[in-house]
Image (cartoon, coloured by chain):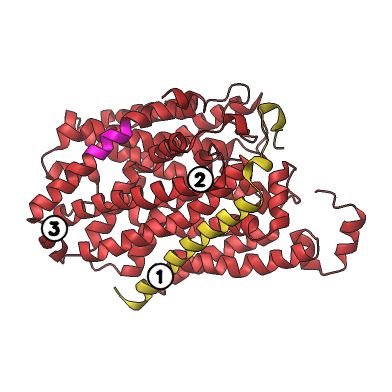
Amino acid sequence: MAAEKNVHMTGIGEAARSKVPMNRRLGFWTNSAVLAGFVIVISSLLVGGIVGANFPPRQAVWLILFAALSNSFVAIFICGIAARTGYSSALIYRFAYGSKGSILPNLVMALTGVGWFAVIVNITRDAFVDLVGIPVDSIGNWISMVVISALFVVPAYKSIRWIGYVSWVAVPALLVVLVVVLWKTVGDAGGVSPLFALTKGSGMGILTGMTIAAGGWLQGATVSADFARFFKNARASTGGVLLTFGVLVFIQFAGGAFGAAVTGEWNIFLIVSSFGLVSVTFIALFLGAWSTGQAIMYGASLQTAAPPIPMWKDQETTRRAAVIILWVAAVVAGSLGIETVMNWWLTLLATVIAPIATTVILDYWAFPSRQKMYESGRSPDTLVNPAALVTWIVGFLVGYYSGKQNFGVAVINGMIASAIVYYPWMYLTVSRSQRAEQTLQGRQETKAVVLEGGQSE
Amino acid sequence: MNGWAALALLFEAALVAVAVLAVLSVERRRPTSSVSPETEDEVGLAV
């Protein structure tokens, strides 16, 4: 806990608009614990639950392995950028999308985060009103949602140190729930072999299941920079990601999936209720939901407080104002009942976010000269990068429509299509020492840029 | 598991291996400590 305090950054607040310097970085295990607090969360059990409710365990295992690999791939690269530069996800996006164009990925990530937050708050509220006997159609139901969401937002408003406090309690508590669910699941099924012999499923296609499983945590992998920027180097962040996004997420998905396979429920609150355990485990699940919600809102506040959004007073005041606005947006989404469109929401998430992840990863890791731009601390070299925007549109359309046609795995299709558009375009741009918009106009612009001395913007 | 699903799983496993190797390779050539600011005074403000 003492080491957690080092994360809090006096003077520059939560570094919403600047790098995290080396003297504020954390040791491997401490930062891995922070990352574990982010990934050992209720949403993993929910995604696992959806997979388990739609597929028999023998298929679900492969699906969740695919999801863990897929998210590890994205998180290794994204966290590597964060550790090397000290930038949050929002500040990283500026280089690929341009100093004004970054508003697109930042809004997409913040809005998807708010959606996730509203879903988590609503299912927590449902369990709470059920437990204390508040009628579903009463005003008390709505007030419960507002109060729970406000409580979940407090640590995100304060600092990552407060997020650490909740996580340190929530993570062990949720691990206990996970063990209990797995224990009861295997027990109710009559052993491991009978569990894997279960064959019931909803008839959902396995490729759709892959998209849901991978897409459910893609948002988390893509904003993991917000927590990995405290690692001392990219080697440490890679180890931390393999432990958390690889091993821990896989185990959690399995807990949710097997629990759902036996009970037929995807919601973890309803799964433990089916086992007759809801009153015992409610506190642990509440803490788990809290640890997820606070981290999501913390990340979303960094995305909406970063440039080009103007700074109000100072970095931290801007970020805290963003937290309050996002909370109001989440209350609206929760009031509209966003959790009723959960499957559609997860599929959409994957196709919307996959091109953003691909663009950012390629922009930094495929072009050494652009790596140096990120690391130098200079401003991005363009206001709006058309290559990144076109890539996002193409990647989204390919992912969305290939998913509808059941052709391949939508999230992978979207990533491949994004790479096919972005890499050649930026390869030409970099090899001609141009900006991406100039590459559209041809080779003659190169001379002008060189004469300007590579002036930015 | 059908063919597409098996292919996707293999593809993802290969991508993770590539990611680990790529990050370690860059880190070996230019360590983070050489490209990141040391103190708060050096971080600057993104605009």
Q: Position of residue A164 (x, y in %)?
A: 42, 29
The residue under the point 21% across, 61% down is A57
Task: Write down the residue under mark 3.
Answer: A192
Tell me the quarter of the picture where residue A233 sits.
top right
The numbered mark, 3 or 2, whose residue comes first in the sequence reads 3
Q: Amino acid at mark 2?
A: Ser
Task: Write down the residue under mark 2.
Answer: A237
Tell me which segment is drawn in magenta: A170-176
Residues at marks 3 and 1, CA–CA distance in whole angstroms: 26 Å
Q: Nearer the viewer, mark 3 or mark 2?
A: 2
Name the outermost residue toward the front: B28
Q: Chain of mark 2?
A: A
Asked if marks 2 and 1 fall on the same chain, the answer is no
Residues at marks 3 and 2, CA–CA distance in whole angstroms: 35 Å
Q: Are marks 3 and 1 in contact (CB under 8 Å)?
A: no
The chain letter corresponding to yellow is B
Q: Amino acid at mark 3?
A: Val
Tell me, for residue B10, which label it has, or none. 1
Q: Position of residue A404 (x, y in %)?
A: 41, 69
Q: Position of residue A399 (x, y in %)?
A: 48, 66
**Which secondary structure, mark 3?**
helix
Quadrant containing the N terminus of chain A in the rendered view: top left
The residue under the point 40% across, 44% down is A116
